[in-house]
Amino acid sequence: MTTTLTTRLAKLRARMAATDTDLVVIGPSSHMLYLADLAPHGDERPVLLLVSASFAGFLMPILNVDSSRQHTDLPFFPWADADGPAAALDELLTATGIDRTAPSIVLDETMRADFALLVLDTLPGASRRFTDDTVGYLRSRKDEAEYRALKAAHLLNDRAVAAAFAALKPGMTELDVANFIGAFYKDNGATTEFCSVCFGPNGAFPHHHTGNTRLKAGDAVLIDTGCRIDGYPSDMTRMGYFGSAPEGYGQIHSIVDHAVEAALAAARPGALASDVDRAARDIITAAGYGANFLHRTGHGLGIDIHETPYITATSDTVLEEGMVFSIEPGIYLQGQFGLRLEEIVMIRNGVAEIFSEMPRTAVAAG
């Protein structure tokens, strides 16, 4: 195993000890990728990584063993279709050394329900919870290598978004712009994580599906996009307009930008995630647009584009050094335009450091 993976397993075992956890059970997921650098094919055949205080190993369909062996030196407990997984799982559980009578186990909340039930049926006396205070806890606190990977992805994203605004022409469709951005990513060694392009009134739908709407003068332009490079994604929303800004655009842009700044100031070690949400929401509410801010202020970002911590009005998560999340307040005016500004930040050296270096000022194109 690499030094990074060895360190992560050691940190997980320390968290398991601190949380009285006997066994962590992980399915084919980003949790498995984080702990073992392995993303095996996921279908109906059970694949599990089990970690105890003294052992870590895989339950693995035999047809996946050879390809998976290239990525990990952890032991496999293979099973064949003709036999089923029960005997191999029993051997793996024995190898973990846990007391099967009433173990405290953590289940990967993203795994298939039948995988989870396979484990629970084998350990009927187990108490179980999900990964929030173990693997999730570790993943929400990024290290310097993850910081560098995220920074690189965001700097590439800056270039792609700037190029896309510069390329806007009348009659282009939203899909044309999304394809331009995707090609930019590919030409620079990255893949598209997602891309949402919204012209005019489409921006008032926070989860608009990029389509064949054509660009015309007076349209607001919302680009929310992210790439993935070296295993980590970027995410950013920037606003502009084509030709001339729609009525009220400048005022709304200023309100949302002030909301971003208020949330940035609130995002400090020891603050609650809800404090950050409140800081942004209070600015928009005071301006008279509280009913037009339709979603939470942010989400965590790491291996997954959405992961903990979530920046919501009800979250009691205490922000700590290393946490990475979005700050993305918005105002959505149906039939006119929507305006969202998004930064991904990391709590680093006591402040919220922004990954992007692209200004949030409106981009005037055309």
Image (cartoon, rainbow, N blue to C red):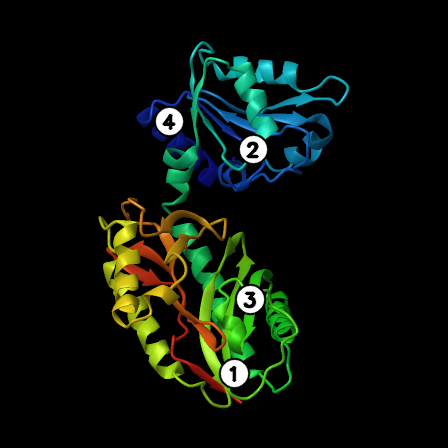
Q: Residue at x 47, y 13 (%)?
A: 97
Indicate which label's residue lies in the foreground, 1 or 2.
1
Residue 27 numbered tag: 2
**Tag 1–tag 2 contact (CB < 8 Å):** no
Determine the CA span between mark 3 and mark 1.
16 Å
Residue at the disc numbered 4: 16
Indicate which label's residue lies in the foreground, 3 or 1.
1
Q: Looking at the picture, does residue 327 appear above or below residue 22?
A: below
**Residue 307 visible in the picture:** yes
Indicate which label's residue lies in the foreground, 3 or 4.
3
Indicate which label's residue lies in the foreground, 4 or 1.
1
Residue at the disc numbered 3: 196
Q: Looking at the picture, does residue 239 appear above or below residue 317?
A: below
Of labels 4 and 1, earlier in sequence is 4
Task: Tell me which amino acid carries mark 1.
Answer: Asp
* Residue density around tag 2, few if under 14, some if 14–19, many if 20 or more, within 10 Å: many
